Image (spheres, rainbow, N blue to C red):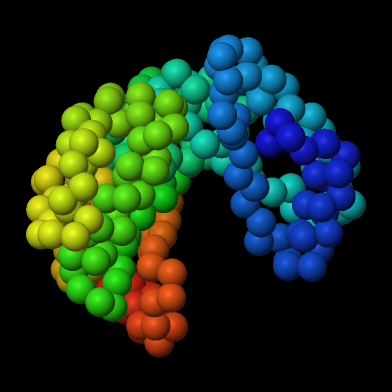
Amino acid sequence: MLQLNPQYMTRRVLTFQVRTSDILILGGGTCPPGPHPGKTVSSMRERLDEHKKGFASFPQGVKRPEVYVAALKLGIAKRAASKADGLLLNFCSPQHAAALIAGVRVERGAEIDFACYLKIFYSSQSDEAAQRLMLQEFLNYDSAPQYHEMFVQDGTAEAISSFRSSEEWKNGPVEVPKVLLRVSLANPRSEELVQYVKSFSQAGVTLPVVYPYFPIGNDPKFKIETVKGIVKSL
């Protein structure tokens, strides 16, 4: 959000809303917060105000988009809640989501939405291939300081770190710790998927966003059938 000129963003959003009958939900965040995260969050809040002023100038009949702000931890969630229509969580457990949501609602009340990306990993090759894809994604995210801090708070950092210190799982048998299966799934059965999504809804997530991942080069037919299966299950 900080990288985009407000006037340019207003024009882009207006064009999109007119062409798509007002379906846009705009997501924003601080990107890497840098050495002074507090100042970065303040700048993001100011920029959000600028965007909203631009959206208020839309012609009659064109809807202002809802704005969701990415929030990994409670501090930024509380500060963003007063400016956003919703908060966007990512790659966390329902327990982490519930604690963050409760903390925000103490100050803001219940009028803000909470969305969460629910990452699910699939592979047509085998369950272990899907599990390896999932574990590698955990490691990729853990390399970002802001995500590592969230994983520490969520109680998953130690389990993730165990796979960084050993590469046997990349070729040999894979055993995913249960603590990570609160956060994500690999090649889940329909009933597992339903229960997984339900756990986030029960935590207070009002917009669970199922986000399937596939390995590069995976069979397109498998991808299509998998997405159809997700839709049917939910």
User: Residue at the location (52% across, 36% down)?
Assistant: 70
What is the number of callouts on the image?
Answer: 0
Relative vertical location of residue 107 with respect to residue 83 in this rendering, above or below: above
Relative vertical location of residue 54 with respect to residue 108 in this rendering, above or below: below
- Quadrant containing the C terminus in the rendered view: bottom left
* Relative image position of residue 108 (x, y in whole percent): 48, 24
- Quadrant containing the N terminus in the rendered view: top right
* Relative image position of residue 198 (x, y in whole percent): 24, 55
| Direction from residue 112 to residue 219 in the image, left or right | left
Quadrant housing residue 150? top left
Res 48 visible: yes
Res 202 visible: no
* Relative image position of residue 55 (x, y in whole percent): 80, 42
Residue 122 or residue 218, whichever sits in front: 218
Quadrant housing residue 106? top left
User: Residue at the location (73% across, 67% down)?
Assistant: 20
| Direction from residue 120 to residue 80 in the image, left or right | right
Relative vertical location of residue 98 with respect to residue 214 in this rendering, above or below: above
| Direction from residue 68 to residue 24 in the image, left or right | right
Relative vertical location of residue 221 with respect to residue 54 in this rendering, above or below: below
User: Residue at the location (35% across, 24% down)?
Assistant: 149
User: Residue at the location (66% across, 56% down)?
Assistant: 24
